[in-house]
Amino acid sequence: MKIGIFGGTFNPIHYGHLRSAEEIRGRFGLDRIFFIPSGNPPLKRKDLAEAAHRYAMVKMAVRENPSFEVLDIECARPGKSYTVNTLEQLLEDHPDTDFYFLLGIDAFLDIPNWREPEQILSLTNFIVLSRPGKNFIELFHSPYLEVKKNVLAGLDRGEGDSCATVLKSGKKAFLTRVTPIGISSTGIRKSIKKGSSIKYLLPAEVESYIISHSLYMQKN
Ligand code: ATP
């Protein structure tokens, strides 16, 4: 069994997340993709919707796709949840499964700031997604990857879809181009504050949920 893990704040989930996950599912032959919205941080963060709302929106967004599933493993936990604990739990719950952790270039570059990064790198394979505004060449200085500069630059120029590399832990990392979709949750929240339309940036049901719960409308 091959399972993708897609973690994020999903504040809110949008078509950039959904389309990237669907392309990766097909390309890597993943049986399922688990979407795992983060929980509530101990200190309330301005502009971060309650975990229960973010979970509800992801649930709606993935409903139609039989390979997509949302897990409340982080949102149901009180206090801050850490990726390392989530991965350990998933491995325990799903023995004999190959896990692939999906994340954008921006998120992969942030791993050194996460709790127990070396342990994280030893628990799962990685699929690092392209994202508008971020280039693979930025991964050249990542302490975890050893990929030649010209290979990274080639990916950025669109020469090839994917590059596979082995991490020190023996797990694999795939640097993978997906259709560039310049949508971000930050952009969506900004549009809502301005009163601009967010139609076609995310599923219609999620848009209705945001409106009916007056999410992201506070100006400060
Ligand atoms: P924000 O703007 O609030 O930072 P976001 O749009 O980056 O949010 P997250 O929930 O933080 O969304 O993202 C979860 C994961 O999805 C991250 O690994 C991120 O890099 C990736 N991701 C988000 N948007 C895109 C996109 N448009 N294309 C590819 N990957 C994306």
Image (cartoon, rainbow, N blue to C red):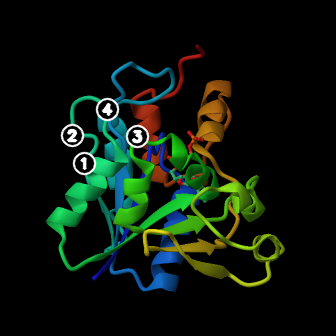
* For residue 61, above or below residue 191: below
Reading the image, the residue beneath label 1 is: 72
Q: Quadrant of residue 138?
A: bottom right
**In this rendering, the label closer to the viewer, 3 or 4:** 4
Q: Position of residue 115 (x, y in %)?
A: 40, 41
CA separation in Å, label 2 and label 3: 20 Å
Q: Find the distance from the CA under tag 4 to the CA under tag 2.
A: 11 Å
Q: Nearer the viewer, residue 123 or 168?
A: 168
Q: Earlier in the sequence, mark 1 or mark 3?
A: 1
Label 1 to label 4: alpha-carbon separation: 13 Å
Q: Residues within 10 Å of mark 1 (few under 14, many from 20)?
A: some
Q: Which residue is mark 4?
A: 80
Query: Which of pointers 4 and 2 indicates the residue nearer the eye?
Result: 4
193 lies above or below 65: above
Quadrant in the picture for the N terminus: bottom left
Q: Nearer the viewer, residue 96 or 13?
A: 96
Residue 61 visible in the current orientation: no
Residue bearing the label numbered 2: 76
Residue at 18% x, 74% y is 95
Number of dots carrying numbers: 4
Residue type at tag 2: Ala
Farthest residue, direction top = 220
Image quadrant occupied by the C terminus: top right
- Location of residue 53 in the rendering, given as x and y in whole percent from the top left corner: 34, 37
